[in-house]
Image (cartoon, rainbow, N blue to C red):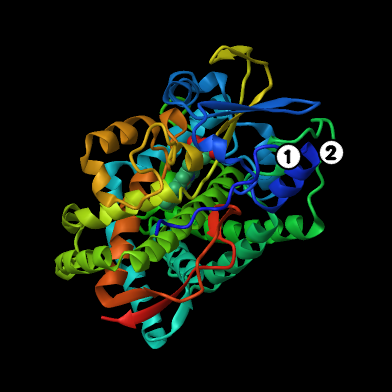
Amino acid sequence: MTPPKPTPRPDKVSLWRYMKLFRKDILSAQPQRLYRAWMAEFRTPFFRSYLINQPELIETVLKKRPDDFPKSDRISEGLRPLLGDSVFLTNGETWKRQRRIIDPAFEGGRLKDTFAAMHAAGQAAVDRLQPQAGSVVECEEITSHIAADVIFRTLFSVPIEHEVAAQVFDKFHSYQREQPILNLAAFVPLPKWLPRLHSRRTRKNANEIRKLIQHLTAERAELIAQGQAPDDLATKIMTTRDPETGHGFDMHEMVDQVAIFFLAGHETSASALAWTLYLMAMYPEWQDRLAEEAAALDTPDFAVMSRLKLSRDVFREALRLYPPVPMMVREATCPERFRDREVLKGAQIVISPWHLHRQERLWDCPDAFDPTRWETENGKTCQRNVYIPFSAGARVCTGAGFAMIEGPLLLSMLLRHYRFELVEGQTPVPVAHLTVRSKDGIWLRVVER
Ligand code: HEM
């Protein structure tokens, strides 16, 4: 029994059928051979896209020459109404300036300061689950709630029960249902000049979310001016000046950044944690080991993280099997030659952590759940070269360090109090929405330990 994987499509299908499959789900729309291919080409009448699945090519695009492969505009379109000019979407000098202001807030030393807020969110989750003990629960909903709580507490020092926080959370949910992170435009031949129309609901939702965030941000600016702001991520980012220009974010730009922190910060962690819980239910012997290790949480301070080692290995393995961001797209700004193939200027380059993490020519037992692999030669080599749940290079996820504290900590806190068990007939099917989710939710029985 290996962890659930979507059934791939047949090798040859018409473009029309491919588009239909793609619209349903990008993971099952791909053929089996992509798990072995070093590179694949998608030819369409208007443009070409290439999936790269080889360590050297990944290194070129993400690490060695990121400036030559900026984020593709085609991908940004769906998210632009909500995220504006957030660091997730910008390129070039604007992006570099934004990272100079944001990155210090997420540096190692600062992350230590977020521990108490993360722990409080974990405790609140443990308490919320108590009345449901003994019953079957939908884990994605539960982990979304926890991860959103973590973001509100660490960014703005407010729990999810805060009225504005709760509204933002609800509205994000509806927005997400309408906007896959990877839209069809990355793969299919829509000419660039075709205007992209966002549905009225999408725009209305985006506007409402932005208004709420603006309210939080304006309130914070006032507290900073009065010298009474709490020392959290929002204060840190809003008071940091770009060392090169001396300017910080203006209000509008800060709202863009807050929007991406909410979105990138809670959707991804929620997806990862939900799949980890499912894996724990599949492998109860691992679950018991983690519960035992979690006794270290008797002393809940940052130092405990170094003792939650199994939890970290398990979470890392879950991120390999179910990378929350399954694919990323870049654009070639000059003609290239990849594996003896011509890559034209303007071509879309697809990097798929989903396929790379299960590349049959690189990983030992790629579809198996094995948290001990990180100690093996093969695991170490693959981790260095082709393990990219947070991307890699200059554009690596700002929240990677944050997420690697949050995930293992929350996992350990939940498993310390509860056991999660499989429910017969409820095998989740991974699909790519905004992040990798289960087609019909992840249902498990939760039992008090
Ligand atoms: C398990 C959790 C997470 C995963 C797997 C994840 C994954 C990723 C990936 C793959 C990217 C690159 C996307 C691309 O290049 O197209 C990214 C970017 C980003 N992530 Fe995360 N992320 C996680 C958590 C977080 C958290 C907690 C935050 C903030 C609090 C965050 C903030 C961001 C931001 C701001 C970017 C844009 C960086 C840039 O383009 O320069 N992420 N994330």
Q: Which of the two marks, 2 or 1, is nearer to us in this view?
A: 1
Q: Is residue 19 left or right of residue 30?
A: right
Quarter location, residue 182: top right
Pick out the residue farthest to the right.
Answer: 194
How crowded pointer 2 is (Cα within 10 Å; few <14, some 14-19, many 20+) is rated as few
Q: Quadrant of the C terminus?
A: bottom left
Q: Is residue 393 left or right of residue 209?
A: left
Vertical placement of residue 13 versus 285, above or below: above
Dot 2: element: loop
Q: Three-letter amino acid code at disc 2? A: Pro
- Whether disc 1's CB lies below 8 Å from ligand 1 is answered no
Vertical placement of residue 266 versus 441, above or below: above
Residue tagged 1: 13
Q: Nearer the viewer, residue 171 or 239?
A: 171
| Residue at left offset 35%, top offset 57% | 407
| Residue at left offset 43%, top offset 60% | 275
Q: Quadrant of the N terminus?
A: bottom left
- Tell me where residue 350 appears, x and y as whole percent: 58, 32
- Tell me where residue 418 appears, x and y as whole percent: 30, 77
Residue 223: tell me if it is visible.
Answer: no
Dot 1: element: loop
Vertical placement of residue 152 versus 19, above or below: below
| Residue at left offset 60%, top offset 56% | 214
Nearer-N-terminus badge (2/1): 1
Q: Nearer the viewer, residue 442 or 153?
A: 442
Q: Three-letter amino acid code at disc 1? A: Val
Residue tagged 2: 195
Quarter location, residue 284: bottom left
- Tell me where residue 323 appears, x and y as whole percent: 46, 48
Residue 324: tell me if it is visible.
Answer: yes
Quarter location, residue 413: bottom left
